[in-house]
Structures are given as structure tokens and as C-alpha cells.
Image (cartoon, rainbow, N blue to C red):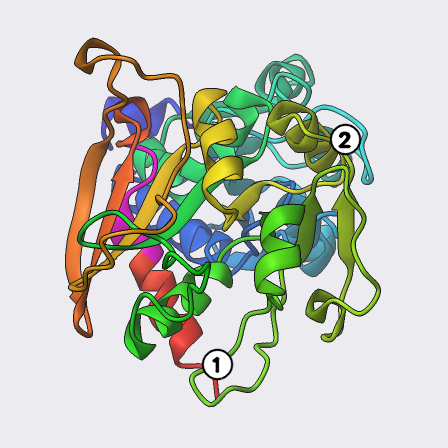
């Protein structure tokens, strides 16, 4: 047995090796991936093994208000967890929210060892490892931490920023126009690009426009499948601005809530949405609203759909953001470029976010969304 494996101790046999520990943690990560995103809480999975090393319980967090992964797995294990070990993808929480602290459940279950992947970045919930150690439980952290961090990359960013992530979507011609001189804007891009937008909308928990876009374009802001049917998941439809939302607007036509945030400040709007549990926003506002978010430093990533077309006049894709010279240019980092039908999709993020917001992970999710019947 390696010295590292031996340090895990507490009656474990030669089978308790680094390989076994990683195997259990990889299973916990698989379980965690079944959890929802977006959600106010991270995706977490847990595996319980008895004192002989046999798996006796598995669980994952199914969303805010539901049992945490550790509690779910311990409920399956029952008395068989006593004297055993728990492998969990995130440091067990030590605070009371909608559910009791996971540390309390682990201590009450009588487990002797807890192995976790990543420390909890949320200062409200962190500190569980220390609580468990003080209760006499052997605690080991950092097993497959990079994989666990990647799984919850977007959630961790929201915790660090203490606001929802904001993705701005725009559709533009080659000459940077989002609408013609007469104000018409349907459609700049083709069918394939519009289907791609709907698939991406489905990966967020809110779609946000301004009252100007609502009054001019009268959008539905729904997620629709290529067949035209409504998707099972519908993000919260949010309209921002001090003007009222007409009761006849098409945004009311589909099931689900429509929220009017009657403020002009992007920061105030995000604060209200944060306290409602919104964590990942799809921004589809016009050039004025987009400029306000960009100027406030509140756009984290961009999906730009560029059509091989020219208008020559009409609305720009974005309004004035206060850039007076090349010295002040706002540069993003390109993460992905691909052809969607006849249009080009550019995914760009702020350089500081590049590591956390990996486009291939988003596209993996998109394939699952597109496969819905």
C-alpha cells in the first residue's frame, strides 16, 4: 500500500488504493453531472462505501431545495454507512440553508472518512472539512479537483462575481448592422443560426431584453425546438426598463413567468435577478441595452452570429460604449469560431474567464438539447 493510501487508514484493506479512491470519485463526478445547471447551487455527487469497501449508497443534488448529494447518498446507505467512507465532489457544506448542513448528516451517519474533490468557493458554505475533522472524521481533499472545478466552472464564477453570468447574443451583417434603415430586423441570419440560438437559450435560466426591443420587435423569448414546438425547459423571460410591458405583448403567449425589472441600471437588474436565484443570463437586447451592459463591465461572453450580407445603413449592433480611441478598445478573447449554415458563429469571452467558460462543454450540452424529441 502506498504511503498516501495508508494515510487514509481507519481499518481499510490493501484494496484501498489511490486507484480505488479515484474510481469512487469519478463515479461521484458522473453522478454530479446529472444535476441541473443553471441552478443557485453547484452540481455535486456522492458515493458511500461501507467498512469493507462495498458501494452502499449513491446520490446527487437535484437542484435548489432538494437534498444535497451527501444526504441523498446516506439515505440510500442507511445503517450500512456507519464506519464507512463517503466520496463527494465538493467539500461538504457546514451551513443551514433550505436544508441542514451536510456535515451534520455525515457525523450522524457515523462515517469515519470523507474524501472530497474541490473545496467549496462559497464563503457562506465553506469550512465543512474543518468541522468534520473536529468531529474525529478522517478528511482528505483534492482528489480529481480539476475535474470537479471544471464541472462547476460557471457556478464558481457566479459565486466569485456575486452576480449572474451574462452572455450577449447578437446577429449582424458583414457591415455591422443589426437592422435595416426602416427598422426591420427579421431575419439577419438563417434558419440554422436561429435554431442554434434557441439551443443556447435553453442552457440559461433567464432571457433578458429591454423594453425598447420588446415594443419594436415583440419577441416571444421562448425556447423552441426545430419543429417549432416549445422546449420542455423555458428560461425566465425578463424585460428590463421603466416603460411598461403591454399585456398584449407576445412575451406573455407561452407558459411560464414574465418578469418586468423596472430599472435602467444593468447592475440593479442583475442584483434583483441574483436574489431570485438566477445565475446564467442570455442577453438579447438591442444596441442600447447591449451598450449599457458592456460599458458597465457586465458582459462575460459573447455569441456573435455574422451573416454574409450587407445593408449599408440601419442600426448598428451596439451603441456608444464610451470608446473614443483605439487605446480604449474593448477586446475579448476568441474561444471558438464555426460555420452555422451560411452564417459564422463567434464565441468570445473576457480573457479572465477563458479558462472557466470552455465552449466545448457548452456545445456538449447543446447536442443533448437538440436531441430532445
Q: Where is residue 259 in the image (x, y as percent from the top left)?
A: 77, 50
* Residue labelled with disc 1: 225
- Circle 2: element type: helix
Examine the rendered structure and indicate whether residue 236 appears above or below residue 192.
above
Is 341 contained in the magenta span?
no
Vertical position of residue 235 compared to residue 295: above or below: below
Residue at 60% over, 23% down: 162
Residue 10 visible, this angle: no
Q: Which mark is residue 104?
A: 2
Return the mark for residue 109. none
Single out the mark in the foreground, 1 or 2: 1
**Mark 1 Cα shell of 10 Å, populated few (<14), some (14-19), many (≥20):** many
Image x and y of residue 18, in percent: 28, 37
Residue at 45 percent of width and 38 percent of height: 154
Q: How far apart are marks 1 and 2 (CA)?
A: 44 Å
Q: Quadrant of residue 217?
A: bottom right
How crowded pointer 2 is (Cα within 10 Å; few <14, some 14-19, many 20+) is rated as: some
Q: In this view of the protein, which residue sits in the foreground, 28 or 95?
A: 95
Q: What residue is drawn where x is 56% and y is 86%? A: 229
261 vs 234, left or right, is: right
* Highlighted range, magenta: 355-362
Judging depth in this view, the residue of 229 and 93 nearest the camera is 229
Element at badge 1?
Answer: loop
Image quarter where the N terminus lies is top left
Residue drawn at 67 percent across, 43 percent down: 82
Amino acid at each position: 500500500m502506498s504511503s498516501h493510501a495508508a494515510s487514509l487508514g481507519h481499518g481499510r484493506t490493501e484494496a484501498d488504493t489511490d486507484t480505488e479512491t479515484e474510481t469512487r470519485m469519478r463515479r461521484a463526478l458522473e453522478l454530479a453531472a446529472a444535476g441541473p445547471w443553471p441552478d443557485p447551487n453547484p452540481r455535486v455527487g456522492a458515493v458511500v462505501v461501507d467498512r469493507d469497501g462495498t458501494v452502499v449508497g449513491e446520490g446527487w443534488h437535484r437542484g435548489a431545495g432538494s437534498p444535497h448529494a451527501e444526504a441523498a447518498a446516506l439515505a440510500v446507505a442507511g445503517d450500512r454507512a456507519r464506519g464507512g467512507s463517503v466520496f463527494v465532489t465538493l467539500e461538504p457544506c457546514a451551513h443551514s440553508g433550505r436544508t441542514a448542513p451536510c456535515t451534520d448528516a455525515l457525523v450522524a451517519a457515523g462515517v469515519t472518512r470523507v474524501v472530497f474533490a474541490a473545496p467549496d468557493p462559497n464563503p457562506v458554505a465553506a469550512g465543512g472539512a474543518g468541522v468534520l475533522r473536529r468531529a474525529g472524521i478522517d478528511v482528505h481533499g483534492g482528489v480529481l479537483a480539476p475535474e470537479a472545478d471544471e464541472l462547476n466552472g460557471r457556478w464558481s464564477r457566479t459565486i466569485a462575481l456575486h452576480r449572474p453570468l451574462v452572455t450577449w447574443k447578437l446577429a449582424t451583417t458583414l457591415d455591422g448592422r443589426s437592422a435595416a434603415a426602416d427598422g426591420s430586423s427579421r431575419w439577419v441570419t438563417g434558419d440554422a443560426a436561429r435554431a442554434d440560438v434557441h439551443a443556447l437559450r435553453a442552457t440559461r435560466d433567464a432571457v433578458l431584453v429591454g423594453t425598447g426591443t420588446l415594443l419594436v420587435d415583440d419577441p416571444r423569448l421562448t425556447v423552441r425546438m426545430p419543429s417549432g414546438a416549445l422546449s420542455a425547459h423555458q428560461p425566465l423571460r425578463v424585460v428590463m426598463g421603466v416603460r411598461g410591458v403591454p399585456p398584449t405583448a407576445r412575451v406573455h403567449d407561452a407558459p411560464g413567468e414574465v418578469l418586468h425589472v423596472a430599472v435602467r441600471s444593468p447592475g440593479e437588474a442583475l442584483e434583483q435577478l441574483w436574489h431570485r436565484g438566477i445565475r446564467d443570463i442570455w442577453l438579447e437586447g438591442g444596441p442600447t441595452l447591449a451598450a449599457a451592459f458592456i460599458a458597465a463591465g457586465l458582459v462575460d461572453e459573447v455569441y456573435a452570429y455574422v451573416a454574409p450580407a450587407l445593408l449599408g445603413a440601419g442600426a448598428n449592433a451596439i451603441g456608444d460604449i464610451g470608446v473614443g480611441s483605439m487605446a480604449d478598445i474593448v477586446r475579448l478573447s476568441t474561444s471558438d469560431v464555426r460555420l452555422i449554415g451560411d452564417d459564422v458563429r463567434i464565441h468570445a469571452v473576457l480573457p479572465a474567464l477563458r479558462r472557466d467558460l470552455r465552449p466545448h462543454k457548452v456545445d456538449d450540452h447543446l447536442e443533448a438539447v437538440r436531441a430532445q424529441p
